[in-house]
Amino acid sequence: MENPPELVIKAGRTESQYWQDLWRYRELLYFLAWRDILVRYKQTAIGVAWALLRPFLTMVVFTIVFGNLANLPSGDVPYPILVFAGMLPWQFFADTLSRCSNSLVGNANLISKVYFPRLIVPASAAIGSFIDFMVSGIILLGLMAWYNFLPSWHILTLPIFIIIAAVAAMGLGLWLAALNVKYRDFQYIVPFLIQFGLYISPVGFSSSIVPAQWRSLYYLNPMVGVIDGFRWAILGRDTQIYWIGFTLSMLLIVLLLISGIWYFRKTERTFADVI
């Protein structure tokens, strides 16, 4: 009679094979993302249409306040298109950040019972936000058709800026997700940060109105570079990028991602105990 196969448990598997485990558990990533999408709009009267209604109403308000009342310049671009070209990346960033920050606490039962790379949880939250982002893009297409506005070849670079927006949201989101496990105060801090960030980011106006002496300092907000990149890709020659400030924003985003992964991995082994 043959002996049963031996089960060998190696020390340090979690550390040495962590990134391979991310791939092995990819089906869990898809499942969590799909579950979040279903739960988000469950038992709502208009369902996924909320992904259209929220940015549309925000665009209307910003157009009235900044375009009509404040009479801020938009160049040759219709003001609603200028606003929505900034609203799209901001909404994607804000939704991803909000979902990531609460993702670990929201999946406490799963985290405390089963091993899997915890990075899957905030990553699945980002996928759900991307679906909303794609749906919201329908409004931009409608606006461009309404105003007979045709994009230039710059539109081909849009996927690059989508990735940059996702990296920015994930970098900060990993910090907040890990901190929220230990300090539940962050569930109240994050909505304030998002609201404050909306007003200091060039969503309702062009960053070109910022005085030249303050422009580099303004780009310390990483979303300024992201929004400018989106507008450059969508509006083409009708907008310009301040490349020095854009480079600064990109460096900060990379730093956010690297430090976010570092802190998340550093505190990850304590999540099941604390949560």
Image (cartoon, rainbow, N blue to C red):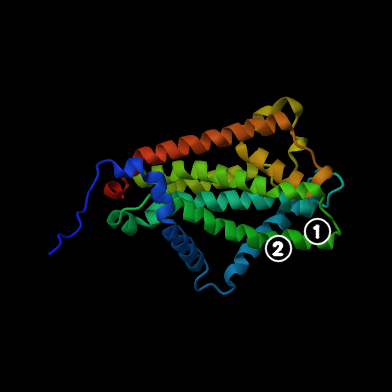
Of 62 and 246, nearer the camera is 246
Q: Image quadrant for the N terminus?
A: bottom left
Residue at the location (61% across, 37% down)? Answer: 222
Identify the secondary structure beneath mark 2.
helix
Q: What percent of the width, then of the height, locates residue 102?
A: 43, 52
Residue at the location (46% across, 38% down)? Answer: 260
Tell me which corner region of the image, top left, top right, bottom left or bottom right, holds residue 45. Answer: bottom right
| Relative to 207, 172 lies left or right | left
Residue at the location (81% across, 52% down)? Answer: 151
Placement of 263 over or under 236, stated as above or below: above
Which numbered circle lies on residue 144? 1
Q: Residues within 10 Å of mark 1 (few under 14, many from 20)?
A: some
| Relative to 126, 212 lies left or right | right
Which amino acid type corresponds to the residue marked 1 in the rendered image? Met
Spatial separation of the CA atoms under disc 1 and disc 2 = 10 Å
Judging by the rendered image, the residue that carries numbered circle 2 is 138
Placement of 76 over or under 134, stated as above or below: above
| Relative to 184, 84 lies left or right | right
Tell me which corner region of the image, top left, top right, bottom left or bottom right, holds residue 112. Answer: bottom left
Which amino acid type corresponds to the residue marked 2 in the rendered image? Ile
Placement of 265 over or under 26, stated as above or below: above
Residue at the location (68% across, 28% down)? Answer: 216
Which numbered circle lies on residue 184? none
In the image, farthest residue toward the top: 213
In the image, farthest residue toward the front: 1
Of 240 and 4, nearer the camera is 4
